[in-house]
Image: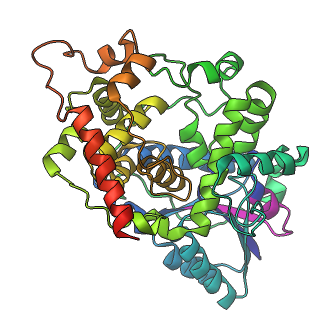
Amino acid sequence: MKITLFWHRRDLRVHDNVGLTAALQSGHPVVPLFIYDREILDLLPSRQDARVTFIYDQVERLGQETAQAGGNFLAFYGRPLEVFAQLLAEYEVAAVYTNEDYEPYAAERDAAVAAVCAQHGASFQALKDQVIFAKNELLGKSGKPSKIFGAYRKAWLEKLQDSDLQAKPSAALFTAANLAKLPDAPARPTLLEMGFEEFRQEVPAAELPAETLVRNYHLTRNSPGRVDSSTRRSVHLRFGTLSVRELMRQAQALNPKLLAELIWRDYFMMLLWHFPFTATESYDPRLRHVPYRNNEEEFRAWCEGRTGYPLVDAGMRELNATGYLPNRARIAAAGFLVKHLLIDWRWGDRYFADKLLDYDMSQNVGNWQWMAGTGAVAAPWFRVYSPQSQLDTYDPELTYVKRWVPEYGTAAYPAPIVDHKFARERAIETLRAAYRAAG
């Protein structure tokens, strides 16, 4: 019996799934699968990682849903190329379907898997699911990606059709008639068998946020002290437990600011696909050799929330405790690291990669380079936010600070690690010199 494999990656759901819909319409019974990728997981600094536990829980949920529908869900702990070589040798596979992933490693991995599939006479189909427009679909008049978000957003809105946001019928097609029942399906690996321990951090349900929250999003998004300051659905978008189309439909109906923030997500994924080197290198060649100070003691103080600037410290402590960081606290923390401490943005991006539940390479690289002034789209390099002004504006009653920095205002709280005026002038002069040196 020929089968179709559907490879889940950043789309851990049955409903509104483009690639799964196509697989279920392929004419061959479908076996969904997930690979716990050792190329990624073996690099994690801890065997207690809430994201791995979250993924495991979602994979087991998908396994149960597939069994209830009359099929088998496979999961493997290994390297994708080796897993597919084994599956293609063991089963008669007509095709492998999946959804596109735009990160540099994913592009190389998928090309290698496609080649192995071809050797075994199986087609490899990757479809667009996690964004509305991708790759070359929205280029500027020059034929290159726009470096101005406003222009991109305008083009995005003009190109959008109602059909782009329509839900796909994967859930309705997910029936025994379209699924394969393998007599020898191997057991899925447990967390313990993969060398991980259960470790959970709080994540909201994978459902649309309340309408009131969405309607007020533009008013609350920069108020870190409020529990309803954002939708907190970024984790679900990252792992695809919520479809971006359903959240965009809600935003389109209720709040244009939230829709604009979701368009940023498309934009940064497009930029990373066009400029994969920006994952590890500044886009602007003039700022690739900034003489960052990279003081390790000051970096540790930033990581641990001991800078003496309460909004920065509150944000970092919340990140360490919960895996979450509100928008305004992210801006304050990132800006402080790259400008006040003159520490390479890649250090901050790496730390966020280890800690954030919703870490997404394209979004974080894009935003870190924006803050550092080094990106394809960037804040002016001479912009240096005042941590005190940020605090006064966005947490004037210290609601957020008191929650995470209870010793603030006492002798136990450290003095500022660096003077703002001095740090601002040092950052501007350092970056100006880098520009001049680059010619």
Query: Can you give x and y, in whole percent of width and height, for residue 236 in the image?
Result: 58, 40
Give the answer, above or below, for where 20 lies relative to 118. Answer: above
Magenta stretch contains residue 371 = no
User: Which residue occupies 40% across, 25% down?
Assistant: 390
Q: Is residue 121 left or right of residue 48?
A: right
**Viewed as shown, does residue 103 lie left or right of 307?**
right
Q: What colouring method underlies this structural image?
A: rainbow
- Find the residue positioned furthest to the right: 162
Determine the residue located farthest toward the top in the rendered image.
397
Vertical placement of residue 298 versus 282, above or below: above
Q: Residue at coordinates 41% horizontally, 46% vertically from top-left?
A: 382
Q: Is residue 300 left or right of residue 359?
A: left
Image coordinates for residue 311, horizontal then vertical, percent: 33, 25
The spot of residue 297 in percent (x, y) is: 13, 46
* Residue, far bottom: 119
Q: Tell me which corner region of the image, top left, top right, bottom left or bottom right, holds residue 383.
A: top left
The percent position of residue 211, horizontal first and vertical second, equals: 71, 19
Would residue 402 be visible to someone looking at this image? yes
Comparing 38 with 274, the one in front is 274
Quarter-of-image position of residue 198: top left
In this orientation, which residue lies closer to the viewer: 141 or 351?
141
Q: Which residues are magenta?
A: 19-34
Quadrant where the C terminus sits is: bottom left
Residue 281 can be seen, yes or no: no
At x 55%, y 45%, the residue is 58
Residue 247 against residue 115 in the figure, above or below? above
Q: Residue placed at 17% from the left, 44% from the top? A: 298
Residue 31 sits inside the magenta stretch: yes
Left or right: where does residue 361 sit relative to residue 402?
right
